[in-house]
Each structure stands twice: as C-alpha cells, then as structure tokens.
Amino acid sequence: MSIPYVYDAGVLLAIDGNDRRMWAIHHLAVEDGRRLLIPSVVVGQAWRDPRRQVQLGRFLHSCEIVPVGLELAKAAGVLCGKAGTRDVVDASVVTVALACGAIVFTSDPEDIAQLSAASDVKPGLVIRRL
C-alpha cells in the first residue's frame, strides 16, 4: 500500500505555474495509485480565476479534496494554539497528514515542521519541499 500525499497551496501554485518537477511528482503518484489529499481550505487559498486556472482545475480532479468541517477545523485551531501560529490552512494540512500517515508536499517546510512538532505525534511528518 502506498503512503498518501497531502498537498499544500504551494503545490497548487506550482501546478498553476506549470512547474514540471511538481507535475512529474504528481503523475508518478497517480501511477502508483497514491491517495492525493488536499484540504478544501487549501483550494480556497490558491483558487482565484477559473478562466485562467483551467490546468489547475483539471489537476484538482485527480486529487481527493478533504472537506474541512467542524471537527477538522477545531483540531487545526488547537494545533495552531499549541504551535503559537495563526495559519489554520497549514494546520489543516498537518492535521490531515497526521490522520492519514501522509507525506506533505509544501513550499513552506519550516511552518509545517513547527506545526508537526507541536502535535506531539511521533514519529513526526515526512515533509518534502517543492
């Protein structure tokens, strides 16, 4: 069984900018049958203009968009409190990744690592920088 990936907004922006390396990583993950998870608030952070983001829209169809409901939102808020941060979007990424045992792909590994450390979940997340 493959380890899932969780993508942050940096991944979506890289895809939107046609970053070849990120496309290659994504295509290999799809071929491997990995679960590719994106918290819904991450989409909101990156989505601006559907007329210009057609490629990103197609990309999103190959991923599983994780709804951020009340329980996930509260868990992300608690994690922000423990880490002393305010970015609930990054905290949502970390919360989903920890729940699924996923690898996080991010453009902001320092913030993701800080949130992961604050979770007290061992072992910590595997984080891959874009």
Image: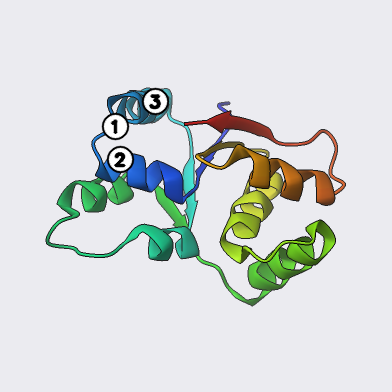
Question: In front: 45, or 3?
Answer: 45
Q: Residue at x 28, y 26 (%)?
A: 20
Q: Is residue 128 left or right of residue 7?
A: right
Q: Quadrant of residue 15?
A: top left
Does residue 71 lie above or below 55 as drawn?
A: below
**Marks 1 and 2 close (CB-CB < 8 Å):** yes
Residue 10 is labelled as none
Residue 94 versus residue 30: which sits nearer the camera? 94
In three-dimensional space, the C-alpha distance between marks 3 and 1, rounded to whole angstroms, equals 10 Å
Neighbourhood count class around disc 3 (C-alpha, 10 Å): few under 14, some 14–19, many 20 upward: few
Mark 3: secondary structure: helix
> Of the residues under marks 2 and 3, which one precedes in the sequence?
2
Q: Position of residue 7 (x, y in %)?
A: 48, 44
Residue to which mark 2 is pinned = 15
Q: Nearer the viewer, mark 3 or mark 1?
A: 1
CA gap, disc 1 and disc 2: 6 Å
Is 48 placed above or below 125 here? below
Element carrying mark 1? loop
Residue 108 on image: x %, y %: 56, 42
Residue behind mark 3: 25
Q: Nearer the viewer, mark 2 or mark 3?
A: 2
Q: Disc count in the image? A: 3
Amino acid type indicated by mark 2: Ile
- Sequence-wise, the earlier of marks 3 and 1 is 1
Q: Secondary structure at mark 2?
A: helix
Task: Measure the C-alpha gap from mark 2 to mark 3.
Answer: 11 Å
Q: Residues within 10 Å of mark 1 (few under 14, many from 20)?
A: some
Q: On the image, numbered disc 1 is attached to which residue?
A: 19
